[in-house]
Image (cartoon, rainbow, N blue to C red):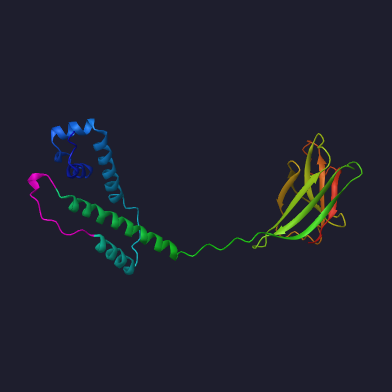
């Protein structure tokens, strides 16, 4: 079986559909081998014609290296053929495709060079524990236990991580508080959902004064004040 000339397949891959005769088009439609070869050539052309996505030009020395590599691989010049023959020598076609692919590769090198010039973002430093408390059970909750840890970020923000376990929740909900060591005031940090939670410490709150961590059982009565039913409580000490 006479397959389609490779030169014609190359021209078809470049989009020159008039390069093939009606018989060659008919053969191509029925021949899996020729279609596969054309598809392979079309993939090369597609790479060479890839859209410009704002690539940054590399420095001159990068282009010099690309030109040197292309120059070593460039085929010998081929004689010019009459365009009316609708044929091109394979060396000319592949030389053009190779040059296009080399241009794309060079642009890729430029992108890699540009990215290499961007400094790596600074490594994020984990928050540091600055205080902690063992939370002891109150008389009505003897099976409970807990722990609280205060951490400080590099920016100076404080958070408190509270863990409570050992007893099932009652009919209400649990709320976390910071209480003054002389019991003269208290600040709610929020509702404890489940057995563990992380709460930001209000800016300006002095933990040397509000040093007691308290977790209470609160009824659904709409009253924002402490119910008086504490589950666990403990004093913060320096970590």
Q: Where is residue 139? Give x, y as percent.
A: 92, 44
Image quarter for residue 62?
bottom left
Q: Where is residue 180? Give x, y as percent.
A: 83, 56
Q: Nearer the viewer, residue 44 or 52?
A: 44
Q: Where is residue 111? Give x, y as percent.
A: 38, 59
- Relative side of 35 to 167, left or right: left
- Relative side of 165 to 126, left or right: right
Say above or below: 128 vs 197. Answer: below
Q: Quadrant of the N terminus?
A: top left
Question: Is 79 part of what is drawn in magenta?
Answer: yes
At x 23%, y 60%, the residue is 74
Say above or below: 21 vs 160. Answer: above
Q: Nearer the viewer, residue 207 or 147?
A: 147
Q: Which residues are magenta?
A: 74-87
Q: Quadrant of the C terminus?
A: bottom right
**Residue reaching furthest bottom?**
61
- Relative side of 9 to 112, left or right: left
Image quarter for residue 26?
top left
Say above or below: 29 vs 47. Answer: above
Q: Nearer the viewer, residue 146 or 105?
A: 105
Question: Is 179 part of what is drawn in magenta?
Answer: no
Residue 201 visible (yes or no): no
- Relative side of 152 to 236, left or right: left
**Residue reaching furthest right?**
139
């Amino acid at each position: 079986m006479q397959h389609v000339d490779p030169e014609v397949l190359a021209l078809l891959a470049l989009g020159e559909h008039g390069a093939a005769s009606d018989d060659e088009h008919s053969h191509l439609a029925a021949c899996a081998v020729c279609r596969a070869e054309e598809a392979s050539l079309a993939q090369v052309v597609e790479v060479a014609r890839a859209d410009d996505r704002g690539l940054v030009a590399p420095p001159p020395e990068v282009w010099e290296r690309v030109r040197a590599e292309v120059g070593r691989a460039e085929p010998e010049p081929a004689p010019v053929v009459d365009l009316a023959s609708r044929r091109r020598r394979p060396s000319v076609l592949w030389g053009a495709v190779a040059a296009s692919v080399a241009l794309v590769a060079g642009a890729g090198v430029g992108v890699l060079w540009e990215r290499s010039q961007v400094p790596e973002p600074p490594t994020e430093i984990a928050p540091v524990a600055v205080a902690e408390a063992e939370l002891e059970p109150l008389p009505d909750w003897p099976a409970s236990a807990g722990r609280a840890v205060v951490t400080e970020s590099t920016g100076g923000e404080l958070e408190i991580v509270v863990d409570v376990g050992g007893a099932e929740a009652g009919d209400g909900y649990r709320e976390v508080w910071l209480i003054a060591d002389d019991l003269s005031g208290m600040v709610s940090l929020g509702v404890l959902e489940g057995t563990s939670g992380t709460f930001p410490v209000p800016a300006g709150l002095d933990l040397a004064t509000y040093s007691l961590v308290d977790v209470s059982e609160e009824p659904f009565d709409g009253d924002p004040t402490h119910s008086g039913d504490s589950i666990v409580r403990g004093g913060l000490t320096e970590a």
